[in-house]
Image: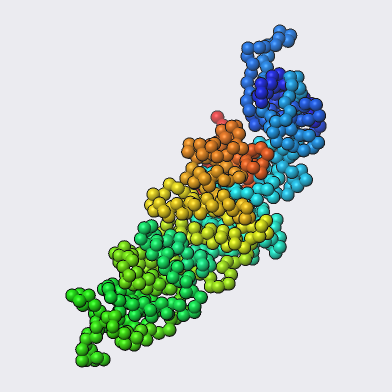
Amino acid sequence: MLAAVGEVIAVKGTKILVKVFEEYNKEFLYYQGIQYKGIAIREHLIVRRGFSDIICIVEGEYLDETRAESTDEKISYIRKIEVKPIGYISQKKFTEGIKHLPMIKDSVHLVAESSLRLVYGDTENQSDFTIGTLMREGIAVCLPWLNLFNTHIGIFGNTGSGKSNTLAKLYSVLLSKLDKKNVDSSFILLDFNGEYTGGTQFINESNKTVIQLNPLKENAPKIRIREQEFWDKDVLRILFKATENTQTPFIGRVVAGREKFNERDDSTKKFIEATVKKAFTTSSPRKEMKELLLNVAKSLDCKPLVETLEQIAWHSSQNKFYLPKSATHPKKDIWFNSDDSEYINHFSENFIETVALDCFQELSIRINLQLINDLSQGFVQFEHIQPLLGRIRESSRLLKNLIEVAKGDEESYDKRLLTIISLKLCNDQSLKKVAALLIVRHYYYTHRETVNSPPNKTVHFIIDEAHNILSQQSVREAETWKDYRLELFEEVIKEGRKFGFFLTICSQRPADISPTIMSQIHNFFIHRLVNDRDLQLLENTVSTLDNLSKSMIPHLAKGCCVVTGTSFDIPMIQQIEQLKTEQQPNSGDVNLLELWKIEKKTKSQPKRRIGRRK
């Protein structure tokens, strides 16, 4: 250990005052061929107390001008520093917290690199998991990665502060360590801006799947969800923005009716036939029933039925359907009523066998049929449900290109180690939120239903630019939809850990994210933040953040971040290592010099005059 550089002269609770010897007031010190940094703010010191070394951090310094010592008639001022104990080293092991306090006249020493590794990392695996170096000391320390990835992680920082590089570096190092064949874990990255879709980012292409969602392209990759997830009242309510009092209960009846008879292979066909008879034989027919049946016939692509329905007319004075005289029945008009069932039976035979339907076609058919049944029984007003039909018809065109429903026991998602889902091409902000919600909901509930207790597998869900989906500030969406979205993510972050489902959230604006979600994050990588609301939120949320580290957040350099949380004994400021060019996320600054073809100017050399000197 280096010779004493000072001594304790005052102890006031946890505030310790140290007098620094004059010969050690230098920027660098050398001892036995090793270079040490001099005493400065945020440097570490050791106070010897018996057989224990108390680790302290420097919080302030000043000159004591009120007290001067005179030696050989020379006046010199005493340099004093304020330090705070953060833990102690005993038997080559660092323990966080205050157990020992120094006494006056205890010697103070600089901290060797080996001791710093004890404070910030595990000496047994010191080179096992490193993503950067301590900012001041330049020492690479190992992160406790086994504990770190067993928690929820938050990465925050203003744009250009280096948070995307931190996210990529963190998971690139982790994935490079894993045995891809024997790891029963899944890593899913939700990428709103397409920053991580490069071929060499995170891991080689054979172990990852990149899904580029594009609602405007029919053959684009899709989100795969299970059939029971699609036929869920809450999901359908969210997809088609159903109103709470009338349209949501109506959707509930559609889903309940399907579940009741879903075991029968011909349930849809039987439902159609029964509804056709009811529409034309009910004692209180409605004019709108014909249009609803036409929608069903067009969905089935049944031309004979479409032609027949188009011939049927509505008699407004008698409030009945009838078939006017034609070549097929020239004698008289055919009236439809509850007693005239013969023609109705013949009429229903025009239905062809139902073809293979996708979930959106089946939903459209069942919505129309259910509305006919509800109208005949007086359950609903057509004007209340009609807007829902229009939204289903319009939204289905885009949602068909986003969602693929897996049938039966079909595997609902790829089993590769890493799946990157890009929402860059989803220009509609509400569509982005719906897609993100369905993805997270699918992975969370699928994992929760299949995992053992204790968990025998894990899912690590990473959300980049998380304020797009976790914000509570949006005023363009209905309150019920916003509540459901936030409640789902709050359930995931509160309950997911016990099922082995972990979230990593990366965002520019932590203040926009739900406080409930922020309060459940265990570990933080905090880059430069300057907004007062963001800083205030961190102050109220991160209990492990000390005042000195907190004061440095608005002034951190690019790539520097405060690392703190339940997996770390004390906060530390790390300079995250820059990834190789081909592995970096697509979030770097634009090179305007190259883009605008501006030539670099070089300093012109003064012209040399040649000739005789006068």
Residue 490 in sight here: yes
Residue 248: image x %, image y %?
Answer: 40, 61
Residue 368 in sight here: no
Locate the N terminus by quadrant. top right
- 537 or 32, which is in the foreground? 537
Residue 357: image x %, image y %?
Answer: 45, 76
Q: Tell me if 518 is positioned left or right of 481 in this view.
A: right
For image coordinates 53% across by 56% down, the residue present is 191
400, above or below 51, in the image: below
524, above or below 469, in the image: above
For image coordinates 72% across by 21% down, the residue present is 8
Q: Tell me if 318 is positioned left or right of 353 in this view.
A: left
Residue 399: image x %, image y %?
Answer: 44, 66
- 344 or 292, which is in the foreground? 344
For image coordinates 42% across by 80% down, the residue present is 269
Instruction: Check the image and name the residue furthest to the left.
Output: 317
For image coordinates 37% across by 62% down, the residue present is 247
Q: Tell me if 388 is positioned left or right of 259 in this view.
A: left
Residue 64: image x %, image y %?
Answer: 64, 16
- 292 or 88, which is in the foreground? 292
- 336 or 362, which is in the foreground? 336
